[in-house]
Amino acid sequence: MIDRRTAQQCGKADYGWLQARYTFSFGHYFDPELLGYASLRVLNQEVFAPGGALQPRTYPKVDVLNLILQGAAEYRDSEGRYVQAQAGEAILLATQPGVSYSEHNLSQEHALTRMQLWLDACPQQENAPVQRLKLADCQRYRLIASPDGSDDSLQLRQQVWIHQVILQPGEDYSLPLNGSRAYLQSIHGSLTATTPSQQQAILSCGDGAFLRDEQRITLTATSPVRALMIDLPV
């Protein structure tokens, strides 16, 4: 099964200093049928105005993955840790109960655009509080995060694999899936996703798709495309 969710169907917010698109229920946007998908709880794309910041807040026990798409960000926690990241980098925060976290756009002149995922963390597992990964913008395929940190990926506290695929028009890439559920997200560009049973979904910039009970997915670019495949066995 493959079921498209367009960018227009997502929740939206405009606070002036922050513009956001929410795939699942978040903040003021609530849909009882969209509280997450398997262990994926949040998938947001947000644009911070110059100098914009999210003030310190606590999280449930989740892994927070931030993909910096444009600009530069700084992350701080109440235990004194901080890290900065530029466009083309990924930051993984292994959040802890009782610890607060803030996020700042480092530029007073340019917007910060980033994609953020929350993934349920296994209660018994502890990883490094902060992990950082540089993503090559010319690399056709990259494993961004995985349960064991394989292939120099970020290590998650959950059985989840997050893949990035970058394709030019006419190129395709086939990915095996580990479990019964997955979520596909077009960061930019258009593509066709095809299952082994020849079901298809056509995604434009910002669109996503739910996958269920598929062992493999093939992505074919119709324009220059950057996409995430979030493999969610649990």
Image (spheres, helix red, strand yellow):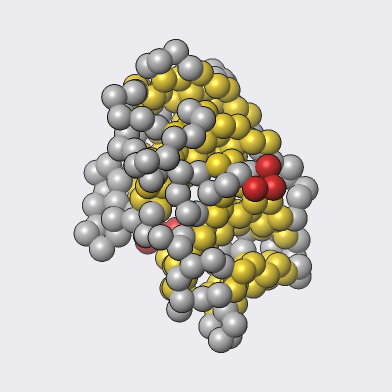
Left of 7 or right of it: where is 193? Answer: right
Q: Is residue 54 above or below residue 207?
A: above
Pick the quarter of the image with the C terminus. Answer: bottom left
Residue 180 in sight here:
yes
Residue 2: x and y in percent read 47, 75
Q: Residue at x 48, y 17 (%)?
A: 81
Q: Residue at x 32, y 34 (%)?
A: 59
Q: In the rendered image, which quarter is residue 186 located in?
A: bottom right
Residue 55: x and y in percent read 35, 22
Pick the quarter of the image with the N terminus. Answer: bottom left
Q: Is residue 214 above or below residue 110?
A: below
Residue 172 vs residue 151, the one in the foreground: 151
Q: Among all residues in the image, which is located at the extreme top?
A: 80
Left of 10 or right of it: where is 82? Answer: right
Residue 118 in sight here:
no
Q: In the rendered image, which quarter is residue 58 located in?
A: top left
Q: Is residue 100 above or below residue 163?
A: above
Q: Is residue 88 above or below residue 82?
A: below
Q: Residue at x 44, y 13 (%)?
A: 80
Q: Residue at x 24, y 57 (%)?
A: 31
Residue 234 vs residue 34, the one in the foreground: 234
Residue 94: x and y in percent read 44, 34
Residue 214: x and y in percent read 51, 76
Residue 87 vs residue 15, the one in the foreground: 87
